[in-house]
Image: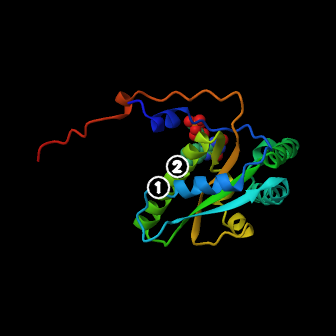
Amino acid sequence: MNSKIEAVIRERRTIREVHGEEISEELLTSILEAAAYAPFHSAKEPWKAYMIRGQEEHKEYIERVLNCYSRIKVWEKFGAERILDFEEKTRSYYEMIPVSMVITSKQIHEEKADFEAVLATAALIQNIQLLAWEQQIGVTWRTTADIFDKVFQQEIGIPSNEKIVGTLHFTQIPKKIPKAKNRQPVSDWLHSLELPIL
Ligand SMILES: Cc1cc2nc3c(=O)[nH]c(=O)nc-3n(C[C@H](O)[C@H](O)[C@H](O)COP(=O)(O)O)c2cc1C
């Protein structure tokens, strides 16, 4: 196997080092349009994306994140002084992100449909990551503590019948790309079911 898609899948890395450089909205829209060809098993696509652009919008957003962290005591075990330090680092990080998106999945409180909706949204997210990579844009898919907090969800205006599947941070790919985490050989995780004969 030696295809273009294989190369992008293998080469894509999570990019946590963010640079403030702008990313064109047109490019992001074309990435989302193509990513939407992810599989889904409902009458209509279950996902939604909420965009945060530029420093000012991120400043507003991060205060909601930090309020949430404080309310649910994410950093409490580290002590007050270190919390201030973490807050400052988090603010500086967020202010350098050119574009973020909160990605949600519609939930109808039915186990199978809700499971399928989240899986389809995860497929959308991976499509976004791969398409972005091809355009020299790196993504970090984050599932930080805030996304599980209903008060936070309400504070940022996301309806309660949507589940946040992740937050995506977009940035230009830096010169130094992080090394890939080792992947287990397929023989370690591919098994025969070996069913006993009935
Ligand atoms: C569901 C999911 C949640 C993730 N959440 C985070 C996160 O909260 N913070 C983070 O830094 N990376 C997060 N990541 C990125 C993973 O850490 C990353 O994909 C993994 O280390 C493999 O590296 P790679 O993406 O460069 O191959 C998440 C990835 C997935 C699939």
Looking at this view, is 140 or 171 the one in front? 171
The residue labelled by disc 1 is 38
Q: CA distance from mark 2 to mark 1?
A: 7 Å
Q: Position of residue 101 (x, y in %)?
A: 67, 56
**In the displayed structure, does residue 82 sit left or right of residue 31?**
right
Q: Quarter of the image holding residue 42?
A: bottom left
Q: Position of residue 102 (x, y in %)?
A: 66, 58
Q: Residues within 10 Å of mark 2 (few under 14, many from 20)?
A: many
Q: Earlier in the sequence, mark 2 or mark 1?
A: 1
Cβ–Cβ under 8 Å for marks 2 and 1: yes
**In the displayed structure, does residue 33 sit left or right of residue 111?**
right
Label 1: state its secondary structure. Answer: loop
The residue labelled by disc 2 is 127
Determine the residue positioned at 56% across, 29% down.
181
Q: How many marks?
A: 2
Label 2: state its secondary structure. Answer: helix
Q: Quarter of the image holding residue 40?
A: bottom left
Q: Quarter of the image holding residue 63?
A: bottom right
Determine the residue positioned at 41% across, 27% down.
185
Determine the residue positioned at 55% across, 43% down.
130
Q: Amino acid at mark 1?
A: Ala
